[in-house]
Image (cartoon, rainbow, N blue to C red):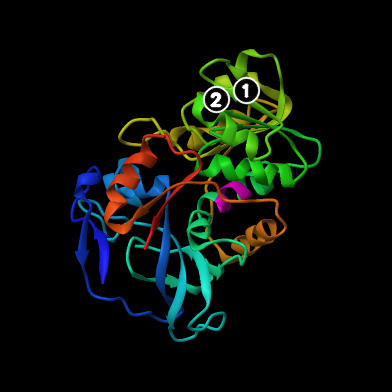
Amino acid sequence: MKAIVQDVYGNADVLHLRDIPQPAPGSGEVLIRVRAAGVDQGVWHLMTGRPYLIRLFGFGLKKPKVPVRGREVAGVVEEVGAGVTRFQPGDEVFGTCEGSFAELVCAKENLVAAKPATLTFEEAAVAPISAVTALQAVRDAGQVGTGQKVLIIGAGGGVGSFAVQVAKAFGAVVTGVCSTGKVELVRSLGADHVIDYTLDDFALAGLLYDVILDTAGNRPLSVLRRALAPRGTVVIAGGEGGGKLTGGFERSLGAPFVSLFSGQKFKGLVSTENYRDLEALTALIEAGSVKPAVDKVYALAEAPAAVEYMHEGRARGKIVVSI
């Protein structure tokens, strides 16, 4: 079968389309014929091996432990392993795995759910990581409720585009922060207000928010707290733009300590992948509250270009590889 493989850490030029052996599902796994694979920030981190901290988390010190890239997947179950009870061949599914930039991939049963019937495979493939992260940030870390004022930084990106919709579904008044080219997208997603950060600085506007969700990963906590209500909550989802060692994740690591000296809460989100939140997301999708925003669709052979485009930050919503 064909797959996008890398032998060493590096930029997109280390990714190559190759023929590799077909995987076989182990106990508790399903073999999925991939129809589409989402492109998230994690793909870039695992491709480059940066920040170096991720290498210590079991992904490979000198080279990738799993050579096939891609983690978000949507496709059709081809075969089930021993002990699998929730799926059978022919089921359409979406979820997370290791190595979705391939024609076939194995995924753990508990990381996969039935694909929302209202979505195409391309739309479903961009949701498992980004949308679940947004759901956990809004529902769990932010505990967003009706009437709360929520500021979402990076509202036009992968996690942010979902977070706008999830926060609206939970009854919030949402302000999205994004670049000029993404203003119309964020408005179309349902944001009540949109701030173009190239023109205005939300921290200097004098407005206070009950919850601030930062998915852009590059603003100091001291800046965020200027726009935060006295009893408000900041949720840091992801970390970008830092050094080679921690890559910006130091904000998430340090956030809880800031809360010790303030009535304001600062939380670093570490999202957890599970099928129950995929099912909760499906309920929001089928209710019409959430719709994946797909910017561009690439062929499998074009996956290196897809990763580059995503990492440049120009994507309006999500990027997907169609197989």
Pick whichever, 223 or 36, lies toward us: 36
Residue at the image position 50 percent from the left and 23 percent from the top: 220
Give amino acid for label 1: Arg
In this view, the residue farthest toward the bottom is 82
Residue at the image position 57 percent from the left and 80 percent from the top: 86
| Disc number for residue 221 | 2
Expressed as whole percent of the image width and height from the top left, the position of residue 218 reads: 46, 28
Give amino acid for label 2: Leu
In this view, the residue farthest toward the right is 147
Write down the quadrant of residue 64 in the picture.
bottom left
Residue at the image position 42 percent from the left and 73 percent from the top: 32
Label 1 secondary element: helix
Pick whichever, 257 or 26, lies toward us: 26
Between marks 1 and 2, how big is the CA–CA gap? 6 Å
Marks 1/2 in contact by CB < 8 Å: the verdict is yes
Q: Which residues are magenta?
A: 131-135
Expressed as whole percent of the image width and height from the top left, the position of residue 184 reads: 59, 32
Q: Residues within 10 Å of mark 1 (few under 14, many from 20)?
A: many
Quadrant showing the C terminus: bottom left
Residue at the image position 51 percent from the left and 83 percent from the top: 88
Q: Report whether 99 appears left or right of 189.
A: left
Quadrant showing the N terminus: bottom left
In the image, residue 196 above or below residue 61: above
In the image, residue 284 above or below residue 262: below
Residue 285 appearing in the image: yes
Label 2 secondary element: helix
Pick whichever, 107 or 228, lies toward us: 107
The secondary structure that dominates the magenta segment is: helix
Q: Does the magenta run of residues contain 49?
A: no
Expressed as whole percent of the image width and height from the top left, the position of residue 175 reads: 67, 30
